Amino acid sequence: MRFSKSLIFFIVALIIIICCSVIGNILYFVNYNEESYCFSSAYGTSKGNAGLYLLHVGNALSLLFFIVAIIGAFAISRSREFSLILLVICVLRAIINLAGIILLAIALTDYKCNPAKAIVGLLINMIGIFIVIIFLCLGLRSRSYEDEGVYQ
């Protein structure tokens, strides 16, 4: 079985996004457990609710990302369309998560909570998303070079 550069980029991107998600979620929940009353009060506001809903939409996009990634990995013809779909999903998730992080940070600071670990955890999640976007772009670029024919 021959590994292409785009497949290697894809595998590394999946490992990175999983590691960043795990680390980010651990930090978030540690901070939430330390100040659960303050967080609960902040989440009861309109900004807090909006931030939580946006993060849930981002998590749903993550599930969609993995479903499309698995379908793309087992597809008979690995075309650029799967990579482009994954790239669009990642960009949408990044935008939605960034808006959710901003709204949650505003809600938590309004209630004078100490959201440092939670925000750092969510930002680590964002870093994972941006790294995956970079790897997907590199995978698309290497795939386009592999598809070019060499004529002699």
Image (spheres, helix red, strand yellow):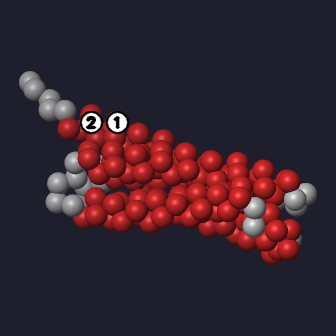
Q: Can you say whether 71 is above or below 145 in the image?
A: below
Residue 24 visible from this viewpoint: no
Residue at 14%, 29% (x, y): give it.
150
Task: Give left or right: position of 134 versus 102.
Answer: left
Residue at 29%, 51% (x, y): give it.
82
Residue at 27%, 34% (x, y): give it.
145
C-alpha distance separating marks 2 and 1: 5 Å
Report x, y in % for residue 143. 28, 41
Residue at 14%, 32% (x, y): give it.
149
* Residue type at numbered disc 2: Ser
* Residue at the disc numbered 1: 141
Task: Give left or right: position of 132 versus 24.
Answer: left
Asked whether 27 or 8 is in front, the reply is 27
Quadrant that contains the C terminus = top left
Report x, y in % for residue 48. 72, 60
Residue 72 visible from this viewpoint: yes
The numbered disc on residue 144 is: 2
Q: Callout 1 environment at 10 Å: few (<14), some (14 to 19), or many (20+)?
A: some
State which quadrant residue 136 falls in: top left
C-beta proximity under 8 Å, tags 2 and 1:
yes
Q: Callout 2 environment at 10 Å: few (<14), some (14 to 19), or many (20+)?
A: few
Dot 2: element:
helix
State which quadrant residue 104 falls in: bottom right
